[in-house]
Amino acid sequence: MAYGHKTEHRLRVRAQVVLHAARGRSHACIARETGLPWDTVRRWRGRLLRPGRG
């Protein structure tokens, strides 16, 4: 999904954030590599870490 050409852009970017986070990368590193603002990365990662999300 992170690299699919038919996947909606926002879903692809979120999947890339998840993959980077799973590799243990920092918010700043993920923001640099995806082109997202640091705060957006922090917010998305926070949502993914909430209980009941996986």
Image: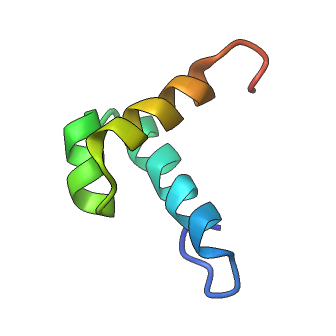
Viewer-proximal residue among 47 and 3? 47
| 43 versus 3 height, above or below | above
The quadrant in which the N terminus is found is bottom right
Residue 23 in view here: no
Residue sitting farthest toward the top? 51
Give percent across and percent down for residue 20. Answer: 39, 47
Instruction: Report x, y in % for residue 25.
Output: 28, 37
Report the residue at 69% width, 77% height from top.
Answer: 7
Q: In which quarter of the image is residue 22?
A: top left
Residue occupying the point 59% across, 65% down:
10
Which residue is the extreme one toward the bottom? 5
Q: Is residue 49 above or below residue 40?
A: above
Q: In this view, does 46 lie above or below 34?
A: above
Residue appearing at x 79%, y 17% in the figure: 52
Q: Quadrant of the C terminus?
A: top right
Is 9 displayed left or right of 21 in the figure?
right
Q: Is residue 10 left or right of residue 13?
A: right
Q: Can residue 34 be seen in this view?
A: yes
Q: Considering only vertical position in the picture, is 54 above or below 30?
A: above
- Locate residue 21, reporting x and y percent: 41, 38
Q: Position of residue 30 (x, y in %)?
A: 30, 48
- Viewer-nearest residue: 32 or 43: 43
